[in-house]
Amino acid sequence: MPTTPLHDQIVAAGARLSDYLGAETAATFGDPRREYVELRSGCGIYDLGWRAKIVGTGADRVRWMNGMVTNNIRDLPPGHGNYNFLLNAQGRILGDMYIYNRGDYLLLDTARWQALTLLEVMNKYIIMDDVELTDITEKLTALAVQGPRAPEVLRDAGFNFADVEPLQVQDIAWNDLGLSITRMAGDISHSYEIWLAPAGAAAVWDALARSGAKPVGTDALEMFRLAAGIPRYGLDITERYLPQEAGQDQALNFKKGCYLGQEIVERIHSRALLHRMLTGFVVDGPPPAPGAKIQRGGKDVGEITSALTVPGGNGDRTLALGYLRMEARSPGAELSINGARAVVRLLPYKELAA
């Protein structure tokens, strides 16, 4: 299992390590609940070395990539990105990624464990095209700063930048170190990513920690993900599902023309052929296991994909994601999971994470 460039920093800060999406990183620094609260109301810092970076070069890169993924790459302005699915010919989801227009190249950002599969699939479709895909994960890493105090902490640590929109990238210099800063997509509070060479990661981490950012592990990130209703590929989104079922409209563009799997996506869109959809739930009791059946009137109408107990201002809540048949998908409807009451919350349920 690969370690990340911040391994020594997170160990020194007291982390318990675990595998997360293809790399060993911090699961917690001792108290995931406190770390979750820091993300919500303070400023947390966390390792993003479990993300992979892939560069697309060549004269045909934009045209070719636009024909591979579900979003509009052709019209991305320089310094901007968007969220994408890679589909198979049957319209099933093979993976997800963010793609950024970096001027003379495209930058793909995905979970490490997905990178090899995505590269294998994509490379099969490079025939006579002037396109080359290169995994540069060992040359470009990332960390994140998140929470209402994140802009203040960044500036106290000497990061001088004009605030960026979600998925907009700005290249800056910090202590003679070149790096890039962007904001995460669809964030509820301030969430910034810093991309940089691995050799500089420790210095950036230490400077941000001295300025007040508190270390956060992936246990707390998973709490935040559930509270924000954000699905994770490999868990809530897999090859079993079609894009519209996943409910991630920001990954789809219906005006861009042909791409791999587009015929199926367009058929569902034009005929409204949707039988189930990713949905949020508030569940009474402990978190149900993935695969737990959702029932209405004693009949199965869906299944859970992920669930966690998350701290809240009014006490702990069990939040879950799962696929639910459309006829049962009414906001506030009361269903049953393992005999426990589950209340339907359509995504994104920002009122639960605010």
Image (spheres, rainbow, N blue to C red):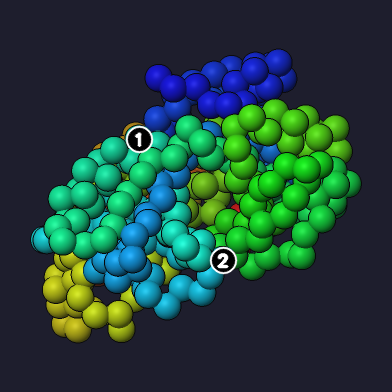
Q: Residue at x 53, y 40 (%)?
A: 140
Tell me: residue 247, above or below residue 253: above
Q: Nearer the viewer, mark 2 or mark 1?
A: 2
Q: Is residue 129 visible?
A: yes
**Residue named by callout 2:** 79
Please identify the quadrant where the C terminus is shown: bottom right
Rendered location of residue 295, percent (x, y): 26, 51
Please identify the quadrant where the N terminus is shown: top left
In primary-sequence order, the first of circles 2 and 1 is 2
Distance between mark 2 and mark 1 Cα atoms:
26 Å
CB-based contact (under 8 Å), mark 2 and mark 1: no
Q: Residue at x 21, y 43 (%)?
A: 120
Mark 1: amino acid: Trp
Residue that lies at the very extreme toward the left in this rendered image: 90
Rendered location of residue 168, percent (x, y): 59, 65
Mark 2: amino acid: Gly
Q: Residue at x 53, y 26 (%)?
A: 4
Q: Residue at x 62, y 42 (%)?
A: 196
Within the image, what quadrant is residue 83 found in? bottom left
Within the image, what quadrant is residue 251 found in? bottom left
Task: Name the disc covering residue 148, or none.
Answer: none
Rendered location of residue 18, percent (x, y): 49, 21
Residue 90 is left or right of residue 296, and the answer is left
**Residue named by callout 1:** 113
Question: Considering the numbered disc 2 on the image, is that residue within a helix, a strand or a loop?
Answer: loop
* Residues packed near mark 2 inside 10 Å, few (<14), some (14 to 19) or many (20 plus): some
